[in-house]
Amino acid sequence: MGRGGRSAPRAALVLRGIATRSIATRRIATRRIATRGRATRGLVWRVAAMLLMTAAGGAAPGGGGALVAQRPTAARPAPPTAAPAPGRLTGIVRDSLSGGVLAGAVVQVVPPDDPSRIRSVQTGADGRFVVDSLPAGLYLLGFLHPTLDDFGVEAALVQLQLAPGAVVDVELATPSPRTIVAMRCGPGDQGGVWLGVLRAAQGGSLTAPGRVRAQFTEVTVVGNRMERRSPNRFANATETGAFAVCQLPVDQPLRVRGFAGVDSSGVLELRIPGDGMLVRDLWVGRAEPVAPSARGDVGAQLRGAARLRGVVRDAQGKPMPSARVEVVGSGQGGATTTTGQFALQGLPAGSYMLEARALGFEPMRVPVDLVLTREASVEVTMAAATPKLDTLRVRGNADLWAVPPEFEQRRKSGFGRFIDPAWLEERKPQVMADIFRSTPGIVTMPGQMGREQVLMRGTGMTGSCVPAVFLNGLQIPMPDGNLDTVIQPMDVRAVEIYPRAASAPIQFQTRNGCGSIVIWSGARRPPGK
């Protein structure tokens, strides 16, 4: 209620964060006001001066406008009037990138005729803000947030007229993802796009220029055969860590990784959603490889100071006890308690995949961001495994016993060492260690229970280390180097050996401080031959 018992006028005005024509032609760089602690008055005076000239219909300084003298008139006393009721400004700031709201944004309101009356408020967790006790008049409205600085963009300024006693609701938003994509990738259709910020897991700024890599599988038909390739897409991060990886496939698995000097992330598994836009940050950190013990009964691990706490549940929300969880590529994991909870410490910093396994359930992988400034938390939901029996198909095709086409492609690249079915048939290994004897970079030594271990020569002072093992493209836990517990020699069709992690394809790279062994199973020749 206003003064004298009359209702105060109320107006509902929703502005979509688009400046009027007069403001759009006079945009100014405001993203570092207030949030960076720099002076704002000079910038506000420039905007105020332009708006006052426009509102008065005058020319800009130097425009040659003439002044006309007016005859003075006798001043008459003005009748007493009641002071106009103050207005109120409410609103919300939305994050167009994530589709949510923007908490912690600094909203600034300034009357162009008096920049000294600038008002600043901060949005809450719900993205909303309130500015009370505003005199009626013309205002310029904008907001600041580190997200704008990260991507090097500016939010549009809004001009509004506030009537006496009015309540105005305003909706502001960051620039659309397509606007940022056009800035980073260029105009036109860029396919799927991944936007994000490369961040330092230890906090603060990146210690070196950052780069992001995304790899996917591409199958093409050439003549009467199919070829499979694994193209890479790279993007350099800006000084603030912002990146945009363009021309990616939509709704297909991506294997991504970030680098900044000696810091890096694990290999994450992501997908571009159906709308063609993925917004996700990536954390990079440093890890300390820990070599296996002298007996070789402890696998190489990556250690750090990050912590992770979480819970594993089934599809009905019930906690799952005794589920196995592991940070993929670190060699570290544990089991859940009776309440389905787990806690891991001493983990490498950066973004990784967490894998959960339990008997009778489908394995589940989720990305986790392990930072040093706080303990990370995650919830994993597992679905029950459903047996699926497909129609039995029998084909007489010699290609069924051939090595995978990507095996031959990688052999032609010249990286790594490759063992094909012909070599295996000639040597006829009795144990798995027989396959790797006399192979450069490989060490075989006696292990527990008379079984031989297959190790790799480490770099520097690490000595021998346990390599990462992949069976038919999937990583298999092998903490002691005993390959006979994974597969028998008669079932091996082909082998790929990468003594150095840097030489391995991205899908076979880990951060265990060692190389990788890739084993393909199956018959080495058709029956009867």
Image (tube, rainbow, N blue to C red):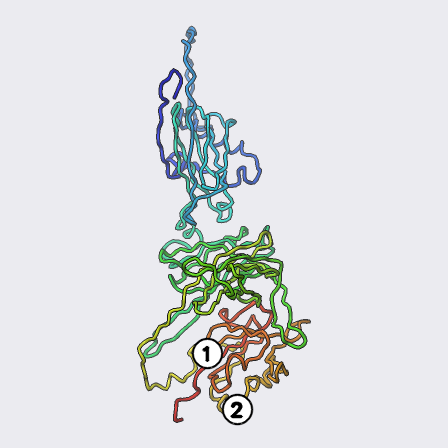
Q: Residue furthest bottom?
A: 528
* Residue 110 picture location, percent across and down: 47, 30
Q: Amino acid at mark 1?
A: Phe
* Residue 349 picture location, percent across and down: 58, 59
Q: Nearer the viewer, residue 522 or 276?
A: 522
Tell me if 456 is positioned left or right of 519 in this view: right
Number of callouts? 2
Please tell me in which quadrant of the rendered image residue 362 appears: bottom left
Determine which residue is flagged by label 2: 427
Tell me the crowding category of disc 1: few under 14, some 14 to 19, or many 20 or more residues within 10 angstroms, Cα based: some
* Mark 1 element type: helix
Lower sequence index among marks 2 and 1 = 1
Q: Nearer the viewer, residue 43 or 330?
A: 330
Foreground mark, 2 or 1, reads 2
Q: Is residue 236 above or below residue 3?
A: below
Q: In the drawing, what numbered circle is on residue 407?
A: 1
Quadrant for the C terminus in the image = bottom left
Q: Nearer the viewer, residue 161 or 312?
A: 312
Q: Amino acid at mark 2?
A: Arg
Q: Is residue 367 above or below residue 97?
A: below
* Mark 2 element type: helix
Quadrant for the N terminus in the image = top left
Residue at (63%, 75%) from the top-left corner?
297
Please tell me in which quadrant of the rendered image residue 217 appears: bottom left
